Amino acid sequence: MKRLDQFLSENSILTRSKAKDAVRSGRVTVNAVKAKDPAMKIGDTDEVMLDKEPVTATGPVYIVMNKPAGVLSATEDGKDRTVLDIVKESEKIPDSIKKKDLFPIGRLDKDTEGLLVITDDGKLSHDLLSPSKHVEKTYFAVCTGTPAEDAAERFSDGIMVGEDYKALPAKLQVVSQEDGRCELLITLTEGRFHQVKRMCHEIGSEVEYLKRVSFGALKLPEDLKPGDLMLMPDFPEKVRTEK
Ligand code: URA
């Protein structure tokens, strides 16, 4: 059970105080009867209408974004544009969703592009980021250098990053190499600060371009351009549970 004004503010474009005003001015009905009290309790089966339009409870929200370079994976920032600024400016996202407590699941560096999920589902975020779940994240990197023969083996054994940190086993696939440059696909199950860049540095390659292409079973849709986003009706169960 939830207060009527809370239900309205969570599931329509009204703020909590505007929801109270709407109830008091007779714009809201509950089970076809005009509501008078914003504190009235609403259950799952009650039918709420605002200005004769049904208001239904929305579940958690999942937005898939191709994060563009130059934007922070944060909710707000005094200086730089954030992924939440992109969501708020998007015409594809209804106002009722923009009002939710949305946040990105994990972070990509400012100069990294690619798959980012934005949600208000704290449990899903916790599950996907929990080190014990070992959710795989795959990155496409364009780098300087030519990886040595044993580079993939060093990644799969767990490469030393700096002097004090041994990365968890990771996959390295050399997509192409030519004229002292290479394209790599790197799959990790952890997400430490600048992890891909630091691991590539250890094999003598500096990352010049980085894009996340998958997160668990969720792939970056090919037609989603940097800066573009889409609302997912639900988060695929396969992605939630994938090891
Ligand atoms: N690894 C990095 O170095 N940067 C990212 O943005 C993500 C993974």
Image (cartoon, grey):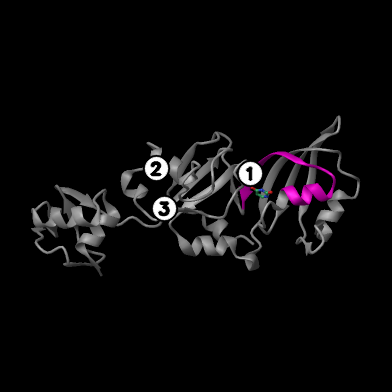
Q: Does the magenta stretch include residue 227?
A: no
Spot the residue most to the front.
79
Q: Name the residue under label 3.
A: 61
Q: Position of residue 105 (x, y in %)?
A: 53, 55
Residues in magenta?
197-215
Q: Nearer the viewer, mark 3 or mark 2?
A: 2
Tag of residue 88? 2
**N-terminal of the two: label 3 or label 2?**
3
| Left or right: 155 as drawn, with respect to 35 | right
Of callouts 1 and 2, which one flags the residue occurring earlier in the amino acid sequence? 2
Residue at the spot 26% in from the left edge and 56% down from the top edge: 9
Residue closer to the observer: 155 or 101: 101
Q: Residue 136 appears in which quarter of the rendering?
A: bottom right
Say whether marks 1 and 2 touch (CB < 8 Å).
no
Query: Residue 112 sits in which quadrant?
Result: top right
Residue at 26 percent of width and 51 percent of height: 12
Is mark 3 in CB contact (under 8 Å) with mark 2?
A: no
Location of the C terminus by quadrant is bottom right
- As drawn, which residue projects farthest toward the top? 179
Marks 1, 2: nearer the viewer: 2
Horizontally, is 97 left or right of 163 in the view? left
Residue found at x 85% / y 55%: 154
Say whether residue 213 is magenta.
yes
Instruction: Of the two numbered discs 3 and 1 on the same chain, state the one appearing first in sequence.
Output: 3
Give the residue pinned by disc 1: 213
Q: How many residues crowd around disc 1 within 10 Å: few (fewer than 14), some, or many (20 or more)?
A: many
Q: Which amino acid does label 2 sit on?
A: Lys
Q: Distance between the residues labelled 3 and 1?
A: 21 Å
On the rendered structure, is 85 left or right of 197? left
